[in-house]
């Protein structure tokens, strides 16, 4: 159920530190962390690991998003050299992406024996997840376990050294309060049931030979735990990319789930994260860009911009329904969006063209993932500059 309403209420920043400073020293920096009595945070360091959380159900675009993100950050992302061929980690010059599946405390057989799904917190070692993310943020390397998706077992650990940006992607990056508090920005990819089903069919039926019935059964089997443990995390997200069926096709709509209505919901008041807007900040806008400058075939394209509340937080929302015919014309749309955190004119369009082969490159999923990637780069640069 969508939690976005057009009322207003007080914004709450997830970052409201309070406490007395305790000085900790790590390899290349010194920090002072808050405890219970003052609001002082003193930080001086030569190296900073910014931590980003990306949450979504399985098969909902986390890997696609992190590929776009590492590209925006620069340099190719690859599994650790010479390591486990089934590693779930990606390392680039700037960022390391770890997959939280690696913190499964129960392997596939263990989950089966106990009758719990991979979404159930009992299958996850949150203590270790917290300790290791905390350590990396503090500039210390860790030996992280590896969950092997080929064998379904937990492999020997791999070394993770502190990068400039650590992305933790998976089912539960915002589930545990201790881990959540380590995040400098949190993203939730909110894929509606209809679209999730269409994507699963596309991947698991076309590419993996599963039957329609087995795909339906697997989604149904995970749904209670998804509703209980995964979806509630979206209330903590600083940005949500919500993917819904189109409203541009009347009647039964688009039953292949190819034409999508995508919303970028951005919390107000988040440090270093200024929401993107269309035309005029704070107004309500409906825009059909099709015409001389943007080619649109049926069913066209519609943008909207407005604000409201999401789980009690003030938010701005940019929405795109439909798909682009010609990606090189996207620059026309880009010029009407502000606060994009681009470094040069046309950077969004350039990123979208570079990754035209990734799923969602012709619609709002690719557009908003790219924009969130640029915002993360900007957030990182602001944090480093401040420190
Ligand atoms: N924006 C999109 N548009 C269309 N299909 C998409 C989109 N994003 C993802 N998909 C489909 O979902 C599949 C899974 O995407 P991706 O690997 O990025 O998800 P994931 O959350 O990392 O999955 P997993 O957790 O299973 O590794 C893709 O192969 C594609 O079929
Ligand atoms: O939801 C998942 C995470 O994306 C996987 O189902 C979970 O990690 C278990 O993996 P596998 O099915 O390979 O044992």
Image (cartoon, grey):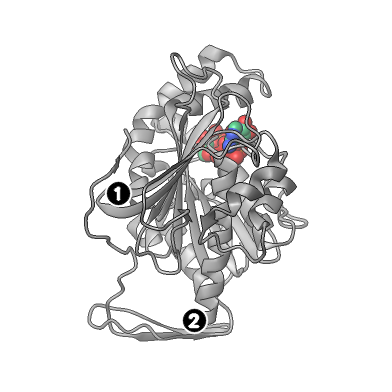
How far is disc 2 from disc 1 in space, using C-alphas? 30 Å
Q: Secondary structure at mark 1?
A: strand
In this rendering, the answer to whether 205 lies above or below 77 is above
Give the residue displayed 34% in from the left and 68% down from the top. Answer: 15
Q: Which residue is mark 2?
A: 386
Give the residue displayed 41% in from the left and 24% down from the top. Answer: 221
Is 303 on the left or on the right of 326, as rendered?
left
Q: In what quadrant of the picture does the N terminus appear?
A: top left
Q: Is residue 301 visible?
A: yes
Is 354 on the left or on the right of 198, as rendered?
right
Dot 1 beta carbon under 8 Å from ligand 1:
no
Is 34 on the left or on the right of 28, as rendered?
left
Q: Secondary structure at mark 2?
A: helix
| Label 1, residues with CA under 10 Å away: few <14, some 14-19, many ≥20 | some
The image quadrant in which ligand 1 is located: top right
Q: Which residue is mark 1?
A: 308
Mark whose residue sits in front, 2 or 1: 1
Q: Position of residue 181 (x, y in %)?
A: 37, 64
Q: Position of residue 227 (x, y in %)?
A: 34, 34
Choose the circle earlier in sequence order: 2 or 1: 1
Give the residue displayed 74% in from the left and 48% down from the top. Answer: 354
Give the residue displayed 62% in from the left and 68% down from the top. Answer: 161
Q: Position of residue 101 (x, y in %)?
A: 52, 45
| Label 2, residues with CA under 10 Å away: few <14, some 14-19, many ≥20 | few
Q: Is residue 85 visible?
A: no
């Amino acid at each position: 159920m969508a939690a976005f309403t057009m009322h207003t209420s007080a914004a709450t920043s997830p970052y409201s530190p309070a406490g007395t400073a305790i000085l900790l020293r790590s390899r290349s920096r010194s920090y002072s962390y808050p405890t219970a009595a003052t609001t002082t945070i003193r930080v001086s360091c030569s190296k900073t690991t910014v931590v980003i959380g990306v949450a979504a159900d399985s098969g909902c675009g986390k890997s696609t998003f992190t590929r776009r993100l590492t590209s925006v950050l620069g340099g190719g992302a690859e599994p650790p050299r010479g390591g486990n061929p089934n590693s779930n980690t990606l390392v680039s010059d700037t960022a390391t992406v770890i997959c939280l599946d690696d913190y499964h405390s129960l392997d596939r057989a263990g989950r089966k024996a106990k009758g719990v799904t991979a979404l159930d917190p009992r299958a996850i070692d949150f203590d270790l997840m917290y300790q290791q993310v905390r350590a990396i943020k503090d500039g210390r390397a860790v030996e992280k376990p590896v969950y092997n998706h080929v064998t379904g077992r937990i492999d020997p650990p791999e070394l993770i050294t502190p990068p400039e940006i650590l992305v933790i992607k998976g089912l539960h990056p915002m589930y545990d309060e201790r881990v959540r508090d380590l995040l400098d920005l949190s993203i939730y990819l909110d894929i509606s049931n209809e679209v999730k089903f269409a994507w699963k069919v596309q991947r698991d039926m076309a590419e993996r030979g599963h039957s329609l019935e087995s795909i339906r059964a697997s989604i149904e089997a995970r749904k209670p735990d998804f509703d209980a443990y995964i979806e509630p995390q979206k209330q903590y997200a600083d940005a949500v990319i919500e993917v819904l069926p189109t409203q541009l096709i009347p009647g039964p709509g688009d039953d292949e789930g190819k034409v999508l209505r995508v919303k970028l919901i951005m919390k107000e008041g988040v440090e270093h994260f200024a929401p993107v807007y269309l035309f005029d900040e704070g107004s309500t806008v409906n825009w059909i860009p099709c015409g001389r400058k943007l080619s649109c075939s049926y069913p066209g394209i519609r943008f909207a911009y407005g604000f409201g509340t999401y789980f009690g937080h003030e938010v701005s929302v940019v929405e795109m329904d439909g798909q682009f015919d010609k990606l090189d014309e996207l620059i026309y749309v880009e010029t009407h969006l502000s606060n994009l955190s681009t470094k040069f004119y046309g950077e969004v369009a350039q990123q979208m063209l570079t990754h035209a082969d990734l799923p969602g490159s012709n619609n709002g999923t690719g557009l908003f993932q790219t924009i969130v990637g640029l915002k993360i780069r900007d957030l990182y640069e602001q944090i480093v500059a401040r420190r």
